[in-house]
């Protein structure tokens, strides 16, 4: 997914709240909350006071959605938004925020890899037991008396 700034132009397409929800994958209440929380700067309203989103707003909201998936909370997203509004001078601080989140995500990814490895190992063990290649034993029940199998795992 390429994340680039959408240049401002005179004939920029605009979207209703419903269309913005569809384009961003957000539900109405969540998008309204983001708007009311100041997370969508530059948001305009039409003559009937309804929110009007342009392509830049949609791109920004999609970026916020990604930041949320990265683990940023509302308070952090507000701070990040404020930094973005400061312009180029705040890039180093934004880079630091993203680097910290990336490091945290890498740690989570490693934990997930370990969990998947555990499941894979357990699935192999169960397959071997059911195929008769390994005796069943368990860490939670005594299988030494009447069971013909022994399991060395949970």
Image (cartoon, rainbow, N blue to C red):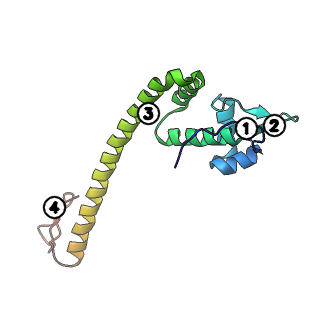
- Residue drawn where x is 27% and y is 51% of the image: 114
Say what secondary structure mark 4 lies in: loop
- Residue drawn where x is 62% and y is 42% of the image: 59
State which mark lies toward you, 3 or 2.
Answer: 3
- Residue drawn where x is 66% and y is 37% of the image: 7
First in residue order: circle 1 vs circle 3 = 1
Q: Nearer the viewer, residue 7 or 125?
A: 7
Q: CA distance from mark 1 to mark 3?
A: 29 Å
Determine contact: label 2, label 1, CB under 8 Å. Answer: no
First in residue order: circle 4 vs circle 3 = 3
Residue 81, picture quadrant: top right
**Viewport quadrant of the C terminus:** bottom left
The numbered mark at residue 152 is 4
Q: CA distance from mark 3 to mark 2?
A: 33 Å
Q: CA distance from mark 4 to mark 1?
A: 66 Å
First in residue order: circle 4 vs circle 1 = 1
Residue under pointer 1:
9
Q: Nearer the viewer, residue 9 or 35?
A: 9
Determine contact: label 2, label 4, CB under 8 Å. Answer: no
> Percent position (x, y) of residue 145?
11, 69
Say what secondary structure mark 3 lies in: helix
> Percent position (x, y) of residue 27?
66, 46
Residue under pointer 2:
50
Q: CA distance from mark 4 to mark 3?
A: 42 Å
Residue under pointer 3:
98
- Residue drawn where x is 35% and y is 36% of the image: 103
> Percent position (x, y) of residue 118?
26, 57
Determine contact: label 1, label 3, CB under 8 Å. Answer: no
How many marks the image carries: the answer is 4
Label 2 crowd bin: few (<14), some (14–19), many (20+), radius 10 Å: few
Q: CA distance from mark 2 to mark 4?
A: 63 Å
Q: CA distance from mark 2 to mark 1?
A: 21 Å
């Amino acid at each position: 997914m390429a994340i680039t700034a959408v240049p401002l132009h005179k004939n920029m397409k605009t979207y209703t709240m419903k269309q913005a929800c569809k384009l961003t994958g957000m539900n109405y209440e969540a998008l309204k909350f983001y708007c009311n929380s100041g997370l969508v700067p530059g948001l305009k309203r039409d003559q009937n006071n309804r929110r009007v989103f342009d392509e830049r707003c949609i791109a920004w909201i999609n970026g916020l959605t990604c930041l949320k998936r990265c683990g940023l909370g509302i308070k952090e997203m507000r701070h990040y938004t404020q930094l973005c509004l400061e312009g180029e001078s705040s890039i180093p601080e934004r880079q630091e925020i993203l680097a910290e989140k990336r490091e945290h995500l890498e740690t989570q990814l490693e934990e997930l890899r370990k969990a998947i490895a555990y499941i894979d190992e357990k699935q192999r063990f169960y397959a071997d037991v059911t195929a008769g290649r390994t005796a069943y034993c368990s860490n939670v029940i005594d299988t030494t008396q009447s069971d013909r199998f022994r399991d060395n795992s949970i």
